[in-house]
Amino acid sequence: MIVAIDGPAGSGKSTVSKILAGRLGFTYVDTGAIYRAVTLKIIQSGLDLDDEQGICEAAEKVKIEFCENNGNRRVLLDGVDVTDEIRTPDVTNKICHVSDRAAVRQKLIQVQKDCANGVNAVVEGRDIGTVIFPDAEKKFFLSADIEERAKRRFAEVVKKDASIELAKIQEDIKRRDHKDSTREAAPLAMSDDAIFIDTTNLPIEEVVNTICKKLE
């Protein structure tokens, strides 16, 4: 069974997906981590970020795996744990060179499918219900007011960078929303059969409980 959870940055989909997968005993697949891992590979390889063919070839060759270590979900890139490395500002600033390219996204469709092949999975991203798993048994689309989403992201980022400003976080999210929803390749969109959940004023546990009730 595939449970697809889509939504913009800061909507709570990652946290909700992790908790939901744990509660259901399902595999959790973070497709954003896949794009981040490929971006890290491009940076490490010294490839030109405008070399679409080179990026496509690199995307085909990488091996990305998800595993658990003492209860913590880890991301492996060619057998190496890169869970922390893929969340660095450098990767975040360059991921668009991978995620915005139609040819690269096409190459990574099967990689994402393989991560949930033969298992019950909660898969989260931005095009799961529309492109990756259009036949998913259940689809959810999470969102929230941009002010609330910015506050959530700020609370995460300020722990690593005390100089970051809330206004900059909000502006970055606005820019990301626009790019994700207007790109030609698999834009961020809610599928017609998805259940919409506004998480602005909802605690995480309540969102998870709502989804569980729908799944029952």
Image (tube, helix red, strand yellow):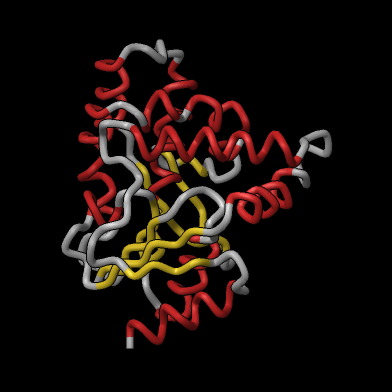
x, y (%) of residue 206?
A: 56, 80
**Seen from this angle, which residue lies furthest left?**
135
**Residue drawn at (35%, 34%), measured in percent from left and top?**
182
x, y (%) of residue 79?
A: 42, 42
**Residue drawn at (78%, 47%), measured in percent from left and top?**
159
Label tally: 0
Compared to 132, does 107 lie above or below?
above
**Residue drawn at (26%, 34%), measured in percent from left and top?**
185
Q: From the viewer's perspective, is 16 left or right of 166? A: left
> Does residue 14 appear in the picture of this structure?
no
The quadrant in which residue 160 appears is top right
Q: 115 or 17, which lies in front?
A: 17
Q: From the viewer's perspective, is 111 left or right of 42? A: left
Q: Split into 4 quadrants, where in the image is the C terminus? A: bottom left
Compared to 195, does 32 lie above or below?
above
> Does residue 16 appear in the picture of this structure?
yes
Q: 192 or 65, which lies in front?
A: 192
Q: From the viewer's perspective, is 169 left or right of 207? A: right
x, y (%) of residue 57?
A: 25, 23
**Residue drawn at (35%, 45%), measured in percent from left and top?**
188
Q: Split into 4 quadrants, where in the image is the N terminus? A: bottom left
Compared to 127, does 78 lie above or below?
above
The quadrant in which residue 166 appears is top right
**Seen from this angle, which residue lies furthest right?**
162
x, y (%) of residue 88?
A: 61, 34
